[in-house]
Image (tube, rainbow, N blue to C red):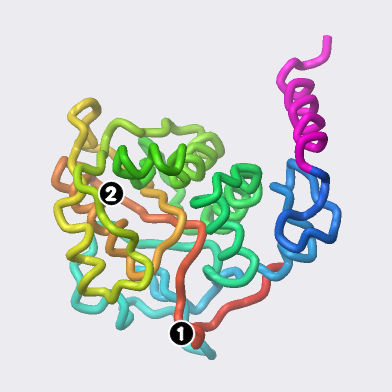
Amino acid sequence: MYPLAPLLREGLEGALDLIYPPVCQVCHEQEAHAPAGYVCAACAAQVRLITLPYCKRCGAPFAGEAANIDDCRNCHSVELHYAHARSAANHTGPLLQVIHQFKYAQARWFSPFLQRLLIENTFAALPPEMWDGVVPVPLHPLKERERGFNQSESLAAALATALRVPLLTRVLRRVRYTETQAGLPRRERVKNVANAFRLCGRSSPSGKRLILVDDVMTTGATLNACAKVLRTGGATHIVALSVARACDGSFGLSASP
């Protein structure tokens, strides 16, 4: 007897190829299929992975031959409530286009591409220890209804499955509708998310070691605000991960292999 799950997956992928032509949804030229998130090899190769050197605390990358830095101007004098943060790639080029369509145009066929990018390039940032769960950055209910889904939850679910730990969606909630962080200076970003998050009360983070997941990180204000609430609720250790990092153009980045 053949395993049912692979057969269902193959059938679903075949159906997707009928609905969406097997062509890259970034360049609209090269062939690409559902398992690759409809991103061709040429466009995927343009994604700029973040590699050393980068700040050990917030994960901000540096240009040149700088040593691995314990503290940078992005997180200097900032009280971080997560142990450290790490992002997979620079939020530019094809990745910027993919994430924008994924979030705002419900282009969910990009999910496999973004999930794989997160998993393959942030696992090394996770200490070899037991984790109690993965927590997605929550959207306000109104914004989630507008978008139709929470993009961070999609990424967090894939990571939780890969780590074989629970996806915790009832620990943290967004209680204040906030404007998008894009374009805001650091000080305004911090104000924008201040008191925007609360514990759900359905599942306590007390004593837990947690991984926070968001789609894009810039200064880290949103992830830090979430981590603060979790730490106040008793979480003992938190790591923050994102698939993309909005970086200054001078940051050192390496090409995707």
Which contiguous range is marked in magenta?
A: 1-20
Is 160 in the magenta?
no
Can residue 57 be seen? no
Image quarter (top left, top right, bottom left or bottom right) of the C terminus? bottom right
Residue positioned 33% across, 81% down in the render: 72
Of residues 251 and 129, the one drawn nearer to the viewer in this rendering: 251
Could you tell me which residue is drawn at 67 percent across and 74 percent down? 255
Left/right placement of residue 50 relative to residue 55 reads right
Q: Residue at x 72, y 54 (%)?
A: 25
Point out residue 229 in the picture as x, y percentages from the top left corner: 18, 47
Q: Residues within 10 Å of mark 1 (few under 14, many from 20)?
A: few
The quadrant in which residue 202 appears is top left
In the rendered image, residue 118, in percent from the top left (x then y), is placed at: 55, 53
Q: CA distance from mark 2 to mark 1?
A: 26 Å
The residue type indicated by label 1 comes to Ala
Taking 110 as reference, is 223 above or below it? below
SS assignment at label 1? loop
Q: Position of residue 40 (x, y in %)?
A: 78, 57
Q: Mark 2 or mark 1: which comes first in sequence?
A: 1
Amino acid beneath label 2: His
Percent from the top left, x then y, of residue 65? 53, 89
| Residue sitting nearer the eye, 70 or 256 | 256
In the rendered structure, the answer to whether residue 134 lies left or right of residue 39 reads left
Q: Quadrant of the N terminus?
A: top right
Is residue 74 positioned above or below 223 on the image? below
Q: Which residue is mark 2?
A: 237
State the residue in front, 207 or 97: 97
The residue beneath circle 1 is 67
**Which residue: 31% across, 78% down?**
74
Q: Quadrant of residue 84?
A: bottom left
